[in-house]
Image (spheres, rainbow, N blue to C red):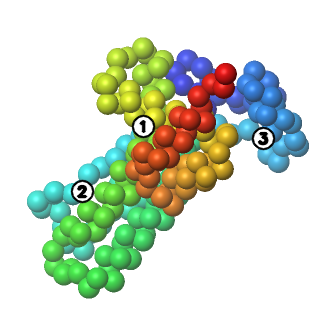
């Protein structure tokens, strides 16, 4: 992925050259035979639309997928999010709702899915943008980012932390599960330099 004036690799050779400047595992991972030419994709921003609390939303009308929220595809949340949207819709329809009124309970459960995916994708993009621009961030956001960095570093050293992180990125668990004090304490202990 690339940001601002940095251009994305547009060929296999330029992709491999970019990987050569990263830790050795990236060069190794990109050294195999290519199955196709490099393809680039541009997305200006992540977007979400909040349907909860609308007073005059039509009955028998719902929104799913990108109509609700679209995310930076680098995080791989789009398809998982859309599948969970379908699950919310199934749960709503199986509850025998009053179809003469707006789908308030559907949109409320959908909001949980969107918030989770947004935390993962838009939160990471915001952190990167703040780093690029040197923006000051509120103290609570700084603490959240510090904690996430501790978790990320520990995924390289602890299988259970890695599994917890992967479950969140696959949207099999809510991002709040990474805020468990015991998990964070273990991550910090693992990241502490050894004397």
Question: Which of labels 3 and 1 is toward the front?
Answer: 1
Most extreme residue toward the left, as rendered?
A: 55
Residue appearing at x 50%, y 46% in the figure: 183
Q: CA distance from mark 1 to mark 2?
A: 21 Å
Q: Describe the element under mark 2 as helix, strand or loop.
A: loop
What quarter of the picture does the C terminus occupy? top right
Question: Which of labels 2 and 3 is toward the front?
Answer: 2
Residue appearing at x 30%, y 49% in the figure: 49
Residue 27 sits in which quadrant?
A: top right
Question: Within 10 Å of the Cα at label 2, are there few (<14), some (14-19), or many (20+) other Cα atoms?
Answer: some
Residue 43 in the image: state x and y as whole percent.
50, 37
Question: Which of labels 1 and 2 is toward the front?
Answer: 1
Residue 96 in the image: state x and y as whole percent.
26, 85
Most extreme residue toward the top, as rendered?
A: 134
Question: Within 10 Å of the Cα at label 1, are there few (<14), some (14-19), or many (20+) other Cα atoms?
Answer: some
Q: Describe the element under mark 1 as helix, strand or loop.
A: helix
Q: Is residue 45 visible?
A: no
Q: Is residue 116 visible?
A: yes
Vertical position of residue 187 compared to residue 85: above or below: above
Q: CA distance from mark 2 to mark 3?
A: 40 Å
In primary-sequence order, the first of circles 3 and 1 is: 3
Q: Is residue 51 left or right of residue 114?
A: left
Q: Marks 1 and 2: CB-CB under 8 Å?
A: no
Q: Marks 3 and 1: CB-CB under 8 Å?
A: no
Q: Is residue 21 left or right of residue 102?
A: right
- Rendered image: mark on residue 51: 2
Pointer 3: what residue?
A: 37
Residue 133 sits in which quadrant?
A: top left
Pointer 1: what residue?
A: 123
Q: Describe the element under mark 3 as helix, strand or loop.
A: loop
- Rendered image: mark on residue 3: none
């Amino acid at each position: 992925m690339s940001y601002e004036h940095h251009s994305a690799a547009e060929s296999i050779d330029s992709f491999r050259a970019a990987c050569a400047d990263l830790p050795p595992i990236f060069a190794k991972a990109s050294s195999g035979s290519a199955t196709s030419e490099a393809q680039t994709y541009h997305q200006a921003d992540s977007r979400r639309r909040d349907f909860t609390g609308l007073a005059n939303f039509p009955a028998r009308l719902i929104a799913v997928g990108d109509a609700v929220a679209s995310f930076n595809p680098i995080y791989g949340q789009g398809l998982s999010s859309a599948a969970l949207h379908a699950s919310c819709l199934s749960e709503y329809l199986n509850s025998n709702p009053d179809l003469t009124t707006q789908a308030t309970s559907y949109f409320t459960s959908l909001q949980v899915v969107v918030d989770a995916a947004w935390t993962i994708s838009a939160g990471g993009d915001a952190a990167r943008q703040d780093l690029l621009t040197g923006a000051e961030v509120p103290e609570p956001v700084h603490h959240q980012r510090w904690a996430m960095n501790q978790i990320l570093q520990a995924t390289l050293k602890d299988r259970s932390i890695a599994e917890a992180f992967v479950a969140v990125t696959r949207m099999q668990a809510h991002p709040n599960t990474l805020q468990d004090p015991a998990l964070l304490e273990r991550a910090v202990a693992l990241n502490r330099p050894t004397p």
